[in-house]
Image (cartoon, rainbow, N blue to C red):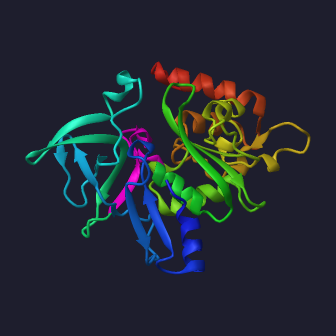
């Protein structure tokens, strides 16, 4: 997925017909599509990957049927540049490389795992990876869309979105952010995302990081990132910034410092559950929740909720 913010800056600098947005997996030799960037409108959020290059064909397929404009489907490629499979690995070639009937012709296709849709003019908009389409609480979510809006926040230097299970085994959205300045806080990011996304797409956790660990191939190392941020309720989950912790070195959070907490309700859109709000609400006015015990207490609450017990 491209950085729309950076493409917009480049377009402002170079002008129309100086940028070409190209798309193509290694299995299709080099590039498969191209799109000369001639304009960027204020309401645009993505740049099309365009039309197929010479001797290349692109199909969008949904449940075995070719997609109409506007209908989302998997991007499949065909043509002279397409590989015949992975060398010496027929076992992993069978699923992505397939033969498919298109009209009266039989095509050799590569299933990219990317999803997109046709625009009325025939250009293709890529929406994200198949792996990035997840369902949480009955809502289907595109991680790429959330990552795009996260990247658009002015104070975000680098961002990464992932899904992981909480202590009760339920899926949650997590956002990891390398801030660019002190104004970029988890609360500010959450407020920004809440203004442009539905509540079910707001991350349950927004973690501020100095940097994102990378694997040898340059991608974000999820395992290392998750190891750095254990899956339990901490200060970030309560909407607090680590730079605002109590000066005595502990991690106490006063209940009056949590304006988003409402009695008997979920305390954060996209957050853990009503159980966490209840744990805070049941404290006497002015009481402190010691940070070292928050995680264990919430873990107990979440596990009890899965057993149908009330707190």
In the depicted view, which residue is nearer to us: 5 or 304? 5
Residue 112 location, quadrant: top left
For image coordinates 42% across by 54% down, the residue present is 31
Query: Does 232 sit left or right of 112 as displayed?
Result: right
For image coordinates 43% across by 65% down, the residue present is 47
Quadrant placement of the C terminus: top right
Which residues, given as a range, are shown in magenta? 124-143
Is 234 included in the stretch rendered in magenta? no
For image coordinates 47% across by 22% down, the residue present is 306
> Chief secondary structure of the magenta span?
strand
For image coordinates 47% across by 47% down, the residue present is 143
Which residue is at the far bottom?
Answer: 15
Determine whether 68 is above or below 279 in the image.
below
Query: Does 194 sit left or right of 227 as displayed?
Result: left
How many labels sit on residues? 0
Is 137 included in the stretch rendered in magenta? yes
Q: Can residue 36 be seen at all in this image of the molecule?
A: yes
Determine whether 14 is above or below 228 in the image.
below
In the depicted view, which residue is nearer to us: 253 or 153? 153
Which residue is at the far left?
Answer: 104
Provide residue 29's location: percent of width, then percent of height. Answer: 42, 47
Query: Does 185 sit left or right of 61 as displayed?
Result: right
Q: Can residue 233 be seen at all in this image of the molecule?
A: no
Provide residue 184's location: percent of width, then percent of height. Answer: 71, 59
Provide residue 166's location: percent of width, then percent of height. Answer: 56, 30
Provide residue 249's location: percent of width, then percent of height. Answer: 89, 38
Residue 179 location, quadrant: bottom right
């Amino acid at each position: 997925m491209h950085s729309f913010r950076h493409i917009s800056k480049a377009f402002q600098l170079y002008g129309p017909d100086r940028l070409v947005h190209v798309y193509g997996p290694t299995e299709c030799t080099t590039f498969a599509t191209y799109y000369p960037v001639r304009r960027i409108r204020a309401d645009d959020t993505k740049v099309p990957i365009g039309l197929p290059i010479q001797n290349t064909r692109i199909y969008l397929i949904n449940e075995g049927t070719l997609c109409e404009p506007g209908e989302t489907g998997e991007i499949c490629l065909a043509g002279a540049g397409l590989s015949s499979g992975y060398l010496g690995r027929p076992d992993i070639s069978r699923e992505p490389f397939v033969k498919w009937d298109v009209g009266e012709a039989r095509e050799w296709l590569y299933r990219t795992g990317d999803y997109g849709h046709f625009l009325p003019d025939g250009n293709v908009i890529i929406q994200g990876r198949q792996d990035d389409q997840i369902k949480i609480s009955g809502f289907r979510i595109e991680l790429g869309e959330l990552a795009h809006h996260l990247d658009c926040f002015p104070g975000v230097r680098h961002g990464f979105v992932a899904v992981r299970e909480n202590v009760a085994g339920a899926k949650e959205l997590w956002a990891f952010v390398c801030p660019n300045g002190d104004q970029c806080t988890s609360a500010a990011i959450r407020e920004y995302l809440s203004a442009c996304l539905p509540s079910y797409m707001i991350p349950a956790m927004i973690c501020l990081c100095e940097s994102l660990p990378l694997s040898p191939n340059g991608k974000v190392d999820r395992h290392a990132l998750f190891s750095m941020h254990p899956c339990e309720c901490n200060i970030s989950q309560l909407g607090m910034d680590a730079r605002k912790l109590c000066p005595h070195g502990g991690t106490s959070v006063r209940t009056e410092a949590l304006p988003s907490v409402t009695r008997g309700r979920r305390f954060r859109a996209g957050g853990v559950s009503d159980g966490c709000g209840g744990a805070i609400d049941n404290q006497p006015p002015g009481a402190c929740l010691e940070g070292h015990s928050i995680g264990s207490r919430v873990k107990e609450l979440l596990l009890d909720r899965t057993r149908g017990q009330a707190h």
